[in-house]
């Protein structure tokens, strides 16, 4: 099992819209708007590293108004 926290930078004012879209993604366990250098933090769990890569590159980064991501992989 792969677990990661994904930090997202987005367009100003789009935080809640993006969180709504994130929470509908299958492997996303939680998503919250935060203060700081990033706007949103996502908790995700997948069965494999390839699934995590697909979630981040093909789904999260493709959401309109997402500007950047930083992934923090959890050490098992």
Image (cartoon, rainbow, N blue to C red):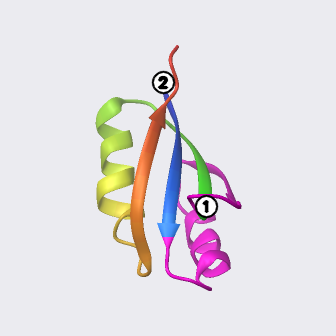
* Residue 26 on the magenta segment: yes
Query: Magenta span covers which residues?
Result: 10-38
Coordinates of residue 60 in the picture (x, y in percent): 42, 62
Q: Is residue 24 left or right of residue 54?
A: right
Please, is residue 3 above or below residue 59 in the view?
above
Please, is residue 6 above or below residue 14 in the view?
above
Coordinates of residue 70 in the picture (x, y in percent): 42, 48
Q: Quadrant of residue 33?
A: bottom right
Secondary structure of the residue carrying numbered label 1:
strand
| Number of dots carrying numbers | 2
Q: Residue at x 53, y 60 (%)?
A: 25
Indicate which label's residue lies in the foreground, 1 or 2: 1
Front residue (pair 36, 11): 36
Q: Pick out the residue farthest to the top.
A: 76
Q: Residue at x 57, y 58 (%)?
A: 37
Please, is residue 5 above or below residue 12 in the view?
above
Front residue (pair 28, 31): 31
Coordinates of residue 14 in the picture (x, y in percent): 58, 83
* Distance CA(mark 1)–CA(mark 2): 23 Å
Q: Quadrant of residue 39?
A: bottom right
* The label number, if any, that marks residue 1 in the structure image: 2
Coordinates of residue 8 in the picture (x, y in percent): 50, 60
- Earlier sequence position, callout 1 versus callout 2: 2
**Mark 1 surroundings within 10 Å by alpha-carbon count, few (fewer than 14), some (14 through 19), many (20 or more):** many
Q: Is residue 60 left or right of residue 34?
A: left
State the residue position of label 1. Answer: 40
Secondary structure of the residue carrying numbered label 2:
loop
Find out whether the residues at labels 1 and 2 contact each other: C-beta distance under 8 Å: no
**Mark 2 surroundings within 10 Å by alpha-carbon count, few (fewer than 14), some (14 through 19), many (20 or more):** few
């Amino acid at each position: 099992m792969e677990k990661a926290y994904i930090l997202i930078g987005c367009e100003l004012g789009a935080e809640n819209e993006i969180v709504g879209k994130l929470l509908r993604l299958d492997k996303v366990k939680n998503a919250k708007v935060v203060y700081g250098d990033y706007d949103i933090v996502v908790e995700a769990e997948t069965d494999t590293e390839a699934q995590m890569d697909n979630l981040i590159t093909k789904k999260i980064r493709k959401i309109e108004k997402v500007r950047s991501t930083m992934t923090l992989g959890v050490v098992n």
